[in-house]
Every structure is written in structure tokens, then in C-alpha cells.
Image (cartoon, grey):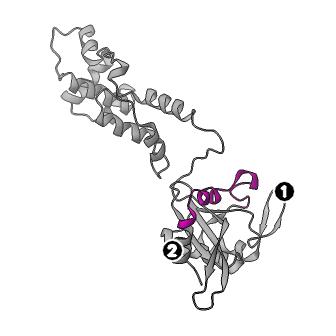
Amino acid sequence: MRKIKDVLRLHFDSGLGQRPIGLCLGLSRTTVGDYLRRAVRAALSWPLPEDLSDHELKQRLFPPAVAVPAADRQVPDWSHIHTELKRKGVSLMLLWEEYQADNPQAYRYSRFCDLYRGWAGKLKLSMRQTHRAGEKLFVDYAGQTLEIVDPRSGEIRTAQIFVAVLGASNYTLAEATWSQNLSDWLGSHRRSFEFFGGIPQIVVPDNLRSGVSKPVATNRISTPAIRSWPSTTGQRSSRRGCASRKTRPRPKLRCRSLSAGFWRVCGIASFSA
């Protein structure tokens, strides 16, 4: 109690700030600030009342925590918090502060983190990954192709469907090209960057024949055009690809969730001659 009284005296009587008080008393600035905030909540100033004992001062500054029944606490929306954590610059501390501001009976931060980790640990564990916003763009060709009919000649040509998916948001671009050769592959990337309005840190392809000249066990040696590309865009490319064939790469998973009708509309609307 002696140091708490000295903090109040130096602040209210001498007008010192938190940092000088901490240097004088050997306390951290955050500890000094905590004492002063507690004094304000307890309506205390300097000098203290003469009849105020040390025990009463402690009770007013550090009142016992009020037990709140679990039924009275509002449980956070863990799925929303899990989604928000994927956004750039968002942390559990920030989300807890927002949750606490709206709920007077909110969980404390440590309990909030424990409950979230317990909830997240029950999610499906197969290939669960955490993606940061703007970090990775997964690219590949869909397994399905699209038949394009020339209205004048009746000729039917098969088009390939290029898909690009942002890892954090699942924001997706799909377009049709005549082939999977290198020029179409690079052109689809350029149009993807224009569509998304920026360039990700990493582009993660699958083991595409147009982009990989020599696949080996630990790395995939890209073609010269692919190797020189990151130097002009300031990004990195992943040599390993987004997944092995057995795990079904992310763009193909995205493709399988879209109907054939969507592919017809998207392919005709986004078709690149």
C-alpha cells in the first residue's frame, strides 16, 4: 500500500506523469497507470481521508471480482471471429476488445483466447490452413473444359478454364482460353491481377506442364519465362505448387462447387480470343 500512496501523492500533489513516477518508485509505467485508473474508479484523490485504513484502501482499489453465471455471459460468434482473423492486421486482442466493448459481462482476454482455441481445435483437420489477406493466389486449370460453337460456321472448339483463387477470401476469377500453353497461361495471370486490382505476395500453381520444364522430387524447375516473371512484379512464386494431385488443389475444389451453367456463362462472358 505504501507505493500506491506514493503514486497518488506524486500524481495528484506533485503533478508528475506516469513515466517519471515509475522511475522514482521503480515501477513500470503500465503499473502506475493501472493504480491511477483504479483510484479514479474508486473516486479517490490526494490527500486520502485520514480515517481510511490500508485494508479499506485495498478493498476500494482492488474489489473482489463479481461472479457472473455462465448463462449470463454472451458467447462470442466463434465462426465470425475465425473469419475475421484471416484479415490483414486483425488479432485476437483486437477482436476481444470489440467483443468486450459490446458486452459488459464479457469474458476476460485469457479466457476468451482459451475458448477460441478450444473451438478452433474441433474444426476438421484435413488440410486446414490459415491464409493471410493478400498473401497467396492459387492458380490452376479446371478439370472441366468448355465447348464453344462458332455461330457462323458451326465449328465446335474446346476451351480451357483458368481459375485463380485468393487464399484468405476465396475471391475467384474464372476465364476461358483456347489452350494451356505459356502465352495463355501468362495472359490469364495478367488479367487476374487486373481483376483483383493488385499483385499477391506469392502465386501458387499446380504442376502445370506449360510452367514447369523439369519436375523433380523436392522442387519444380520453372520455364525461363516463369523464372523471370517475379523479378518484374516484385513477388515470389511457390515451386512446390499448392498441393499434390491426391489432395486436389484449391482451384479445382473451387471449380467443383460451381455448376455447369455457371461455366457456360462465365466462359462466354470472359472468353479470351
Query: Is residue 267 placed above or below 44 in the rendered structure?
Result: below
> In the rendered view, would you say 128 is above or below 19?
below
Q: Is residue 30 magenta?
A: no
Residue 118 visible at all: yes
What is the spatial separation of the Cα atoms under label 2 and label 1, in whole angstroms? 34 Å
Can you give x and y, in whole percent of width and height, for residue 246 in the image?
A: 75, 52
Task: Assign the C terminus to one quadrant of the image.
Answer: bottom right
Q: Quadrant of residue 221?
A: bottom right
Of helix, strand and loop, which one carries label 2?
helix
- Left or right relative to 203: residue 66: left
- Quarter of the image with the N terminus is top left
Lower sequence index among marks 2 and 1: 2
Q: Is residue 23 visible?
A: no
- Disc 2 designates what residue? 194
Asked if residue 207 lies left or right of residue 101, the reply is: right
Q: Which residue is mark 1?
A: 217
